[in-house]
Amino acid sequence: MPMMNPEMSATLLRPVVPSRFRRGPSRPTVESLMEQISVLTSERQRLRDRGVNGSRLERNRVKLARAQWELSHALIERYL
């Protein structure tokens, strides 16, 4: 395993994050993210109750996952 020298850039050590999970310039509040997650969860349940599957359900899943990811980072920032 190669040794790291102190001159190595920290950017080389950062994990690759898919673009849909990169944080944007705006930082929603914990409260607004919790509300967004609630709305998306209700929407997902309605879609499932109606038997909708495929792309609409997948779009909802991705939005929900992103909102949960944002919430975890917002909580970390708040309590760090």
Image (cartoon, rainbow, N blue to C red):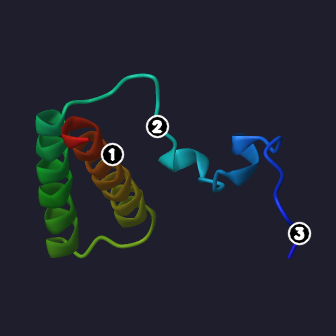
- In the displayed structure, would residue 68 be above or below residue 57? above
Which comes sooner in the sequence, label 2 or label 1?
Answer: 2
Residue type, label 1: His
Q: Mark on residue 2?
A: 3
Residue type, label 3: Pro
- In the displayed structure, would residue 49 be above or below residue 42? below
- In the displayed structure, would residue 30 be above or below residue 48? above
Which comes sooner in the sequence, label 3 or label 2?
Answer: 3
Q: Residue furthest top?
A: 26
Residue type, label 2: Arg
- Expressed as whole percent of the image width and height from the top left, the position of residue 52 reads 29, 70
| Residue wearing tag 1 | 73
Which comes sooner in the sequence, label 1 or label 3?
Answer: 3
- Expressed as whole percent of the image width and height from the top left, the position of residue 4 reads 82, 58
Q: Which quarter of the rendered picture does the N terminus lie within?
A: bottom right
Q: Label 2 vs label 1: CA separation?
A: 9 Å
Q: Mark on residue 43?
A: none
- Expressed as whole percent of the image width and height from the top left, the position of residue 42 reads 12, 58
Q: Mark on residue 23?
A: 2
Q: Which residue is drawn at 45% across and 63% down?
A: 55
Name the element at disc 3.
loop
For the residue pair 38 and 76, the one nearer the viewer reads as: 76
Q: Which residue is drawn at 52% across and 42% down?
A: 22
For the residue pair 72 and 21, the one nearer the viewer reads as: 72
Name the element at disc 2.
loop
Q: Label 3 vs label 2: CA separation?
A: 32 Å
Name the element at disc 1.
helix
Eye-nearest disc, 3 or 2: 3
Q: Which residue is drawn at 60% across and 53% down?
A: 18
Are discs 2 and 1 less than 8 Å apart at CB?
yes
